[in-house]
Image: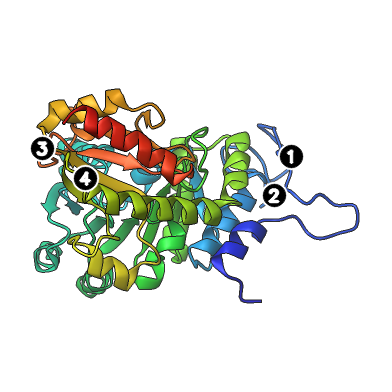
Amino acid sequence: MDLSPATTAVTAGRPPRVQGGPVNPPVVLSSTYVSQGVPGPELLYTRGGTETWAPFEEALGRLEGATRPAVVFGSGMAAVAAALSLVPDGGVLVVPRHAYQVSLGYADDLAARHGVEVRRVDITDTDQVIAAFDGADVALLESPTNPMLEVADLPALLAAARAAGVRTVVDNTFATPLGQNPLALGADVVLHSVTKYLAGHSDVVLGACVTDDADLDATLRAYRTLHGAIAGPFEVWLALRGLRTLHLRVERAQANAAVLAARLAEHPAVAQVRHPSLPGDPGHERAARQMRGFGAIVGLRPIGGAAAADAVVAALRLWVPATSLGGVESTLERRRRFATESPTVPEDLLRLSVGVEDVEDLWADLDQALRAVL
């Protein structure tokens, strides 16, 4: 049966339907398994695999349209490290100039320790990115980017990369599998910070990679085992429970974000708003063409610079000042409070992760905070 993504989120990874059987997969808390003689394909030791990973990996793989299960990791950065292990020593890695700051930091670490040439590009400039593919080994792409919400022409970039023999890794954390499926557009690997929308409740730290390529899948799984980048069974079970409501949470959060972005664009205390749903946003046309929905992250720059941005954060009562994103609660932060954030990210940029609360309550809190610093 050909199921919608919403139905897949609810049904994938369930135990067999047998009389008296559980509806939900159990959590197996065991570090080792009964084994004697020559080891075979059965479970042996939890660093190599556990039955508690399998339902989540199956569900995420199906949501991304893959022909094989996902590979779950102990954190989003563990997934990034595994994917970027595909860059050989002395190789060439293409990355966006604006992307998750720790991913960019890891790229710099590869440059320092392994002689990797890192080429930073403006992901919105398709010609510039394609030119950077010349002689490259791997490209790490984000769309929309974190935190600038720039939208790449993914179909064009992935096609060009494949023609140039460049392996592509697409971070799909912001869009989620409901918003876009990069494998279908030609990506080699899709990665997620499962911590964010997939788990959705700000209570676990996990990552995942998804690929249709058997050799890449084996490489990623071997990396996980050899580097000990494994996830705890209970955390993965929580992530699967969160995944069951992904479609409901994303639908509500996206709708809230679109309403707030439109109102913020007209607010007298706001200098700039970024959200792909806005008709005048630079990424609107591309996002409308290649995404299903515009996501729930909003970029906001208040009038008055960084000091005003900090004052807005301090004046809020419902919105939670916190890093990370994708939970049911609405959070925000000024990104340049991190010294490691890209220097081309504006000092006054607030990244808003819109949650599933009543939109009028969210708006009332934002409005009063913005007017307090006029």
Q: Earlier in the sequence, mark 4 or mark 1?
A: 1
From this view, report whether residue 213 is shown above or below residue 146: below
Q: Amino acid at mark 4?
A: His
Disc 4 and disc 2: Cα gap in Å?
A: 60 Å
Residue at horizontal 48 percent and vertical 53 percent from the top? 252
Which of 248/314 is in front? Answer: 314
Q: Is residue 91 visible?
A: no
Disc 3 and disc 1: Cα gap in Å?
A: 54 Å
Q: Are marks 2 and 3 in contact (CB under 8 Å)?
A: no
Q: Nearer the viewer, mark 3 or mark 1?
A: 3
> Circle 4 is placed at which residue position?
267
Name the secondary structure under disc 1: loop
Disc 2 and disc 3: Cα gap in Å?
A: 50 Å
Q: Are marks 3 and 1 in contact (CB under 8 Å)?
A: no
Q: Amino acid at mark 3?
A: Pro
Rendered image: mark on residue 35? 1
